[in-house]
Amino acid sequence: MAKSNYYIGLMSGTSLDGVDTVLVDFKQRPPRLVACYSHPISPRLKETLLEIINPKWRGSLSSIGSLHQQLGTLYADACKQLIQQQEIDKELITAIGSHGQTVWHQPYGEHPFSLQLGDASIITELTNITTVADFRSRDIAAEGQGAPLVPAFHQEFLAHPDKNRIILNIGGLANITILPASNKQKTTGFDTGPGNGLLDAWVLQNKKMDFDSDGNWAQSGNILDDVLKQLLNDPYFSMQAPKSTGKELFNLKWLKGKIKKPLNTYKKEDIQATLTELTAITISDNIKNCDELYVCGGGLRNKYLMKRITNHLPNIPISSTQELGIDPDWMEATAFAWLAKRNIEGKPGNLSSVTGAKGNRILGALHKA
């Protein structure tokens, strides 16, 4: 096993359901998933992170600094656990790619930024493995959105010479990568809007569950056309790409502010059904000139959501990215392992055609072991 082919990728997304941890072999195409592990996030830490992401949060710099350290330790523990479980010789691992936990994404305005917590120095120190982190900042410095970054990985491994493919990731947010058949056309992509984030927040508030299993609660309700129309009026949905967003916008405060009547005048399951339809429509409205649609992310397991997307796209074949050789549950973590590899090799990790940056850039800050 050549050391230069083995990388660890870490991803804890907006759903906060665990730290996706993968060991990837890049010697072959598509890359081989050697091992994978979901490291738990304690309920208390998850609650704290959800509070910080809330626009109403009024905490202290001290608490942010403390969380930065806690998450660094958490990510290091995830790596060590994966290595221990699989009995991997860590000397074979070139580097760790850590996305970090996004607590605020603000790519617009006079001073754009995207803040991810999880001290990479701690990861390096506790694992003794070189770590690459802070992938978004360089793209934003080059006047890009800093997101989405995974489309570059999709282009590298999932494009087809004769078919127009779209890769759909449904995490807390939903985003698409448009992979044209012709290499004369540029890959594009953007966040379409809510994915599972609003669904998870609503079911947590009303049912004390982390997610709506299979979308069963949503399916028990009715889609409220008037409410859906009000939600679809948000300017983000008509904004031209490049664009990206996060829970800073699409949260329960946003939901309450968009609906003219008080939320308690509606059945709770009807709101869940309507939020599911919002995700389905804002995704499907952006699927154009597509021969094949491949889906990854947790939303793939929401049967009702997938049913609604399929309903809106009756003439497009929809499959899991597993058919292309990339496990849909570990796509993003695998992509950040690859982004670490790009950094180590001195190669660009972004696509300016996606993020709007002035050019392609080497992404990430390198913390050598």
Image (cartoon, grey):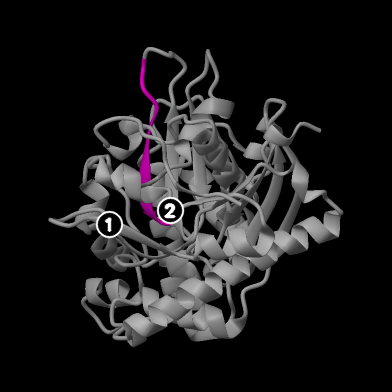
Disc marking residue 113: 1
Q: Nearer the viewer, residue 71 or 262?
A: 71
Camera-side residue of 150 and 224: 150
Q: Secondary structure at mark 1?
A: strand
Residue 93: which quarter of the image? top right
- In the image, what residue type sits under mark 1? Phe
Q: Residue at 70% across / 33% down in the picture?
A: 5
Q: Position of residue 36 (x, y in %)?
A: 74, 52
Q: Secondary structure at mark 2?
A: loop
The magenta stretch is 185-194
In front: 33, or 286?
A: 33
Relative to 249, is 347 above or below?
A: above
Sequence order check, earlier mark of 2 and 1: 1
Q: Position of residue 48 (x, y in %)?
A: 47, 82
- Magenta stretch prevailing secondary structure: strand
Residue 78 picture location, percent across and down: 68, 64
Horizontal side of 134 relative to 209 (left or right) equals left
Q: At label 2, which amino acid type do we have?
A: Asp
For label 2, the residue is: 134
The quarter of the rendered structure image containing the N terminus is: top right
